[in-house]
Each structure stands twice: as structure tokens, then as C-alpha cells.
Image (cartoon, rainbow, N blue to C red):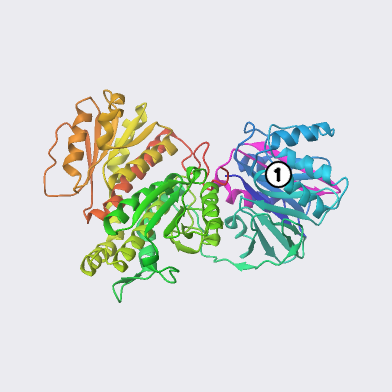
Amino acid sequence: MCGIIGINSYKPVSATIIDSLKKLEYRGYDSAGIATLSSGLINEVKSEGRVDILEKNSLVKDMEGTIGIGHVRWATHGLPNSINAHPHSSQNVSVVHNGIIENSTLLKKFLVGKGHKFKSQTDTEVIVHLITENLKSDNIVNSIKKTLKSLHGSFALGVLFKDQPDLIVGARRGSPLAVGYGPNENYLGSDSYALKSMTNKITYLNDGEFCVIKKTHVEFFDEEGKKINKKVLELSSEDQKYDKGDYKHFMAKEIEEQPTTIKNGINEYLDTANNDINIYNFPWKTKDISSITLIGCGTAYHSCLMSKYWFEQLTSLDVSVDIASEFRYRKNRFKKETLYIFVSQSGETADTYAALDLCKKNGMKTCAVVNVIESSISRDSDFVLPIHCGTEIGVASTKAFLGQILILYILTLKLGLLRKDISEKAFLEKLKDLKNLPNLVKQTLQTDNKIQNISNTFNEAKGSMFLGRGFSYPIALEGALKLKELSYIHAEGYPAGEMKHGPLALIEEGMPVVVLAPRDNYYKKTISNMQEVIARGAKVLLITNKSKDEIFSENIWETIEVESTNEDLLPFLLTIPLQKLAYYSALKKGYDIDKPRNLAKSVTVE
């Protein structure tokens, strides 16, 4: 969701900025732009659509300048067109911005009164004119400090100045921002992934901080404009060469990688020699934790729901789940015995980060479950549990979802054992099954051909439903979300037992309904609910696990059987056909699978 690149170098930067913007495409965006400084002038080129369109513009090919900024925009204020695309520039200042300025209307009114003329519908343009106005009476550092204090909301900024050929300013509040270091050149980026192609030496800005980036050095300032020192971190280079390989889409590759990523996660946390789980440096005694609150958004929220069932089944802890965007605005009754767990693939999800910040301010215990260990949520949490999935490019999360629920399940098992809520014998049996999970996922991936044929029916329907009970309910929600994200088909996930309390009214002849009914404690009840749906004309796709027992139901349209394992682990296997269903539905419609419309990988605005 919006991406920033800035480069201050001794050589031309336009081509490198374009290449770096391509690495930010996975975040989701609808327009792109670049500005460089040469011959004392700001040169700006913007376009609607993909970076490829911007790159083909002859003005970009002819751009000169050894200093510049670039941006991919996900529209918040104003239509996604070239006028509203970033950068936004006055005669003296050019700005790229991630985030939302909440008081932009009032600031714009003030600036128009000062004689400033606006060209776009965006909130970002007020930043350009505010800096321009403040520069009339002060130097750059003081002008930036004054400007930042006037802005309400969230932002990551990259600022270029016509009269400063060796200077880029970066500033952060809420939205992530990093500085990279190179030989006789330095960089600004909203994403370490984009910077990794140029450097593995990174510094992250904290909230309220800003920096002045020159070719040979970088200066950092706190919100009062006082100089501060920052640590330089060295990043792992393991994900630098991640590409599609022989796959048509990143999502297809990421689905097929899941046996490997699950195996990696298990290897990171399981001590096979001692048949134990290693969660090193856990900073609290288990007796000091009486409840857990899990917080996330979207797919991460579904991971939280999934783990709620495990925590309830395998521990005596009280467990609640919150959507991050709701949590921070409720009147929370914080308790020191509660552990707050924040789940986010990117570790930069704005609502989740804000919920974490609220917990930190109230002195709560905080734990992050993230894929990006250098992220804001990771850095600001008391304790971090990485999911070890490697780079995930597809906007619709697949391997990261399984990675999240895997690590949450492992944490549940460990806490259950330490609290003596489960016996050592049961613990060891579950570990044995867990070690076999990568192989079961690999076998379940072979349901490919059948799902390809089934996807046609979903594409022809005006809507669909996904039903499950118990452990299967969060997976039903995730399956519906995937279909919505990729195929733009209306889909809803429901607890199967709730159908008769309203949603059954939506069922009509030929409507596709996915029923998740593994052979667990809920099986017979779910099959009864399925019959209610079939009786009203629905075409039911039953997803269950292999068994010697017959399925006691008639008129099922199609059945997919996944591999069998203990009830705890069946959600991992049930997820696979749903991922593939969404993928093939979108593929047959010809949609942009890795970059679905209106969505972003890293959601850095509220």
C-alpha cells in the first residue's frame, strides 16, 4: 500500500528508482511517479496504472539527475489518475507520501488564503505547500519540524528541494520508513525489500523522527529537531533473489511452497532430539499469564480466530480475539495478566501497529507473530515469534497464513504443556503428528485437477457461501476471503449452524456452497446443516478428510478429500483446496492474481 523510494547518488538515479518501484509493486497501487533534480529544476513524471507504463514514458527515459524520489500510490484521497499520483510538487519542493493527513481540509483552506494554488484532489499536496510556506521564513530542518507538527494523521515522507542538490528529507509518523546506506550514495525506502537490491545496511525511523539524507552521510532528528544517533542494522540477504521461477504467478508458487515453509517453521521451533518445543527467551512466567488477546486484520485475523479454538482446547487460558481497527477505539480494560499477541504478515499493518502502540502505552505484555522480523511491529513488541515463510509477494496471503497458524499452534502446545493443561503423553503424540504435517500438505496439493474444473461453477455464480463448524469455521472465513480478493465474487463465510438463523434465505437453485466437514466432533452436525442447504437447491462442494466411513448424505455436487491427521491439524489441510479454488477462479477470469484490484499487501493506512 503506497511505496516510497529516494536515492541520493553520484550517478543518474531514474532507472534505479524505477527498478526499486517494481519491487514495491506487490504492496498494491494504482499509479506511479518519479521526480529528479537537475540543472536547478524539479523534473516530475507521473502516470496512472503500473510502473511499466511510467517506465515507457519517453520523459522518464530522458530524465537526468543524481538525486530523486519515486512512488507507487494506493488511492485514498482523489481518483487514481496521473494528476493525483505522487510526487506532488511546487516550484521549490517535491513530496512523496504514504499515509493519510486527517486535517488536510483545514490546512488547505489556510494555504489557499496564503495564495497557494492546488492541482490535485489529494491530502498530500497540502504537505508540499506547507513546507513551501514554512521555507519562506526558516531553514530546512526547522521548516520540516514545523510542518510535521502541523500534520494530523499518519505519514512517511520523502522530500526533494529545488535549491538543495544534495539533500533528501525523510520523515515518519505511523507509516514505516527506512534509510539505506551505500558507497557514496544513500537511500530512502518504505520497504526494506526494495532497498535490499541496493544495500543490506538499514536504519529504521521511529515515530516522530525525520532525517536528512546526503550522498556521504545521514543525519537523524527527533520531533523537536534535536540530532540523535541511530543504529545501523545488517539485513539477511536470503530473500533478495526471490522470483516466480517457472510459475505463472507468485501466488501459485507460494501455494506450492507451503510444504517447505511449514517444514522450515517446524524445524525452527521443534527440538527433535529432546521431543520438545524451543521458544527461547520467553520473557514471562506462565503463572503470570491468565488470559490471551489475539489481534489482527484480514487473513491475520482469521489466524487469530483459528488459534482461539486451539488455546481453548489445549490450555485453560481465557482467550479473546479482536479486529485491530476495532480494538484501538474500544474502551479496553487492560489487565497485567493478559498477553496481547499481534499477528501481521508484513509487520507494518497500520491498525495492528496502532493497537500494539496502545498496549505498550498501557504497560501490557506484547508478542508479535510476523513474517518480517525487521518490521515495526516486530521491533516494538516485547517478544517476537517469526513465521519463517520467506518473502510473500502475492497480495492474497497463502503460505504466510499457514505459517501464522503453525506458529500459534506451536505456542499453544508449549503453553499447554508448561501449564500442565495437557499431559506429556498427549504433547508428544501431537508433536509426532506435527512432524508429518509437511508431507500431508504436499499430498493434499495434488487435488489440483479437480479444483480447476470446479472453479467454473463459482465463476458463473453471483455469489457463494463457505460453511464450517469448530476448527473449520475460521477456515471457511479465510476461503471466502480468498475468493473475494482474487475473483471479485461475492462470498461469505458462516458457522454452518447459523444458516437457519438468516443466511439460508440467500440460498437459491444452483448456488455454489462450500461445506467444510472433516471427520471431527462436529461432523454429523455439519452434514445435517449441509442437507438443509442442499434441500434448497444449492450445489454443495464438500471438503472432508479421507476415511473408511461412507459420507451419509445424498445429492452432493462434488467432494474433495484431503489427507487425514488429528483434529488439531486438519485446518491446515482444508485450507489448501480453498486457496487453489480462488486461484483458478481468478485465473480463468483473466484477473491480475498477484495484484488484485483495490488491495494492498502491506496496509499502512487506517
Above or below — where is 432 with respect to 483? below
Is 510 covered by the magenta stretch? no
Depth check, front residue: 597 or 294: 294
Depth check, front residue: 569 or 511: 569
Above or below — where is 303 with respect to 133? below
Locate the C terminus by quadrant: top right
Please name the amino acid that badge 1 sits on: Leu
The residue stretch that appears in magenta: 20-48
* Horizontal and vertical percent position of residue 17: 68, 51
* Horizontal and vertical percent position of residue 579: 36, 44
Q: Which residue is mark 1?
A: 151
Of all residues, the one furthest to the bottom in this rendering is: 273
Above or below — where is 420 with respect to 501? below
Of all residues, the one furthest to the right in this rendering is: 137
Left or right of 316 on screen, residue 76: right
* Horizontal and vertical percent position of residue 30: 59, 38
Q: Is residue 384 visible?
A: yes
Is 21 covered by the magenta stretch? yes
Asked where in the image residue 279 lies, by quadrant, the reply is bottom left
Left or right of 384 on screen, residue 408: left
Q: Residues within 10 Å of mark 1 (few under 14, many from 20)?
A: some
Q: Is residue 257 visible?
A: no
* Horizontal and vertical percent position of residue 457: 31, 31
SS class, disc 1: loop
The residue under the point 40% across, 51% down is: 401
Locate the N terminus by quadrant: top right
Left or right of 272 on screen, residue 163: right
Instruction: Report the number of numbered marks.
Output: 1
